[in-house]
Amino acid sequence: MHIADGILSNEVCLGAGVLAAGAIGLSLRKLNDTVSLRTVPLTGMMAAVIFAAQMVKFPLAFAPAYGHLLGGVLAAIVVGPWAGCVAMAIVLFLQMALFADGGWLAYGANALNMGVVGSLGGHAIYSIISRRFAGPRGKIAGAVVAAWLSVVAGSALFSVEFALSHRGGEFDLPKLFAVMTTLHSLVGVGEALITGGVVSYLLAVWPDLIDAPSRPPGVIAGLGRVVWTGAVVALAVAAFLAPFASEGADALEQTAERFKFDKFERTPVALVLPDYEVPIPGVDVSTGAWHKLSVALAGVFGTSAVLGISLVLGRVARTRLAARDAEATHAG
Amino acid sequence: MPGDFLDRYSLGNTVCHRLPPTLKIVLAAAVIAGCALLPVAYWPAHGCLACLVFVGLSLAEIPLSYLVHRLALFLPLVLVTALSVPLSRGFAGGWEIAATVVIRSLVAFLAALWLVSTTPFDRLLAAMSRLGMPRLFSALLAFTYRYIYVLFDELARMKTAQRARTFGKRSAWQRWTATTRLVGLLLIRALNRAVRIHGAMVSRGWRGDMRTLD
Amino acid sequence: MSHAPAPILKVAHLSYRYPVGQIALCDVNFVVGVNEIVGLVGPNGAGKTTLLLHLNGLLLGTRLAPRNGETASVGTAGYVGAAQNAAGADSNNESRAPVEVLGMPVIPENFPEIRRNVGVMFQDPDDQLFCPTVRDDVAFGPLNLDFPRDEVLRRVAESLASVGLAGFEDRRPHELSFGEKRRVCLAGVLACEPSLLALDEPSSNLDPRSRRGLIEILKKCPAAQIIASHDLELVVELCSRVIVLDQGRIQADGPTREILGNEALMARHGLEVPLSIRYGLEFGKGPR
């Protein structure tokens, strides 16, 4: 997921850097302005937790493969959007400096795709949903949906950045967009599962930790709407437009370029997802006839999976909470 | 604890280690930016920068085996990206672009590696905040860097404890919930620790502003 | 010690209830004089750590009126910022805070001066070593007390030397052994040159050599000390006086050998007569 140097053009790196610096700078300002001195150690510790938690391999239920946490949404839910944004920026900086994950020039793009979108956008979505449904179910559903959307939105942002970097014509934005968002709608299921699982555990063990989200500040709410809309559009593209996009490609292929386009599609995938081993069951994105169906299926699958997860986790948390309450009344 | 932190050679004592950190940051940044700004296929200049970086790495006495190990993790990614250019042109051209992409990534990667391997992380942060990084950000980076080690140890202990209590074949669901619990517990413990750390900071007179000896 | 000069620490009718409602401290009274080293013993959950956190205002308890001292009137107080209610819950309109350090009530206005004078060492050294290098960590206190750079560096060198870690300035905390970590913590506290040292389990998890080193350091330290510990032999060696705390109340307060040698008292509060005292008593040497 981390972009190395040399992949995006200098202009795009610069632009993304300015945007990310603005968002992180604003978050730092907000952090500095908070009344509680505790925010500083909490933010640093949250970053350390995300850093360590990213090393934990999650066995995914549906395949002999592993996923890992990205954490933007989780951080934002636990310490708030601004502190979460700073925490993610710190995690990404340390990964760049200590593990060489992501290039120094591409730091802005990485911080934007994974940090800012995940924490600020993710938190906005989380608070919109969790305020609509009271209780732990709303929070879990919010966390699950926000986690999933943050991954999809991040990938959509990456495809825009990538396409802007290679305007020479050899890359086809709608198609790249479709492939990236489709694939990440699956990767996002992993993120949604993990975030939802951890949040439901936290709610069962230490419910006070995750306060009822207050009304998000205007900026974030706006950003949340943008991400929300963007992701829904991306999903729509993935599920419904992608088949037509590849139809166009089929026509093109007939003229000359079939082999090369098919091959090309694999590259951005391999390029941005080296550390994700999330498989695509029954979907081989590159072959022509399967393309339409698989792309549409993946999009639909992603959506329904996320809905399913939030329902299941909501139920699990409710039983756990009920058990805890019963225990408490028993003891007391 | 994962042993491949980049800064494990940062406590050496070579010419490169003794250079002032600020100078090293400027040098590394200049090499990275210079390489990114060079036009495609301007080989002599690319070659010079690459040589410069290799000289720096050998002066810093970074073992070759270590470099090879790092590159083995890094290069496949870059090669795939670079090859996508000639691939999309049916191998009829674009080789120069591909080569430039590889060289750019390589030089940037090695220059960053040189910087981090010759400068202890705290010095690097101090120099960066002198160069304009917000003080709160560098203080948080230092804090996080400090506690990554503590949390890795804690995570390892928790994993051992979990392994000691579980045996036999478990379903994917069980393994998944166990891992979720692991992360959740780590989070709770870490946040409790943050509250205690806050107490320790306040006890020593902290009033919210970050002060350093620099 | 009855006519000691102005006490370093005075705790009067201190009570504290956790935010969840459980009572942690109830009507705690004691005074610590200059140069006194007081041991604080009691079973797990007795309230030792909670008591230490009150000494520099990390927790703010309430002053319980001695006349109607039922537990029901114990007020709650939050953590630092939330607690301006130090005196609010008083039932006899007594406006003084329950804890006084050098005659200053422990209230937010006095925090800077109080934290300069009270050094607290916590149980887990990792909680206290939050800076990237040993130098930064020991310098943290003096820097926040607004000392000039030269003075800070002098104090860092001096306090590291006093704990036997001269030359450790550039080491990184995660490379230190547990004993070294704890000594760096102590150096960080000593660098503020406190008049009262509050130590929470200073010898836990230390190997015998580190423990011995720590005891020698504490013996040389000029500050008054209050040491919460399960290591009763350490208490016997260092402290002239012992306070037994159990269930949030002071159960006994007196000369070390007298208190720790009282078998019935020790057993009642989940403690044991230290072997050195038992051995001494058996052979007729008697306490003291």
Image (cartoon, grey):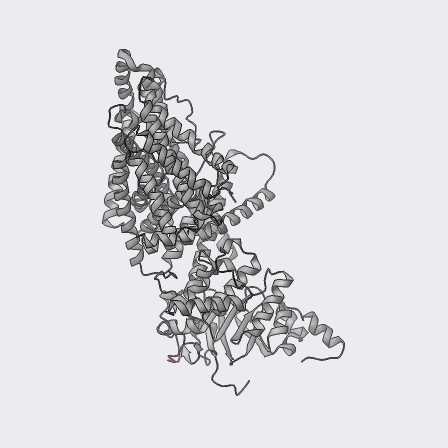
The magenta stretch spans which residues?
Answer: C85-99
Is residue C58 depicted above or below A71 in this figure?
below
Q: Quadrant of residue A261?
A: top left
- Circle count: 0
Residue B128's x, y, as percent? Answer: 35, 51
Q: Quadrant of residue C94?
A: bottom left
Residue closer to the observer: B111 or C231: B111
Q: Which residue is at 53% across, 76% downward?
A: C222
Residue B172's x, y, as percent? Answer: 51, 34
Is residue A155 depicted above or below B11 in this figure?
above
Q: Is residue A188 visible?
A: no
Majority SS type along the magenta span: loop
Residue A281 magenta: no
Is residue A92 depicted above or below C69 in this figure?
above
Residue C194's x, y, as percent? Answer: 47, 73
The reply, left or right, for residue A99 in relation to residue A115 is right
Residue closer to the observer: A146 or A317: A146
Is residue B172 depicted above or below A216 in this figure?
above
Q: Quadrant of residue A19?
A: top left
Q: Which residue is at 67% across, 73% downward?
A: C264
Residue B8's x, y, as percent? Answer: 49, 46
Q: Which residue is at 62% across, 77% downward?
A: C256
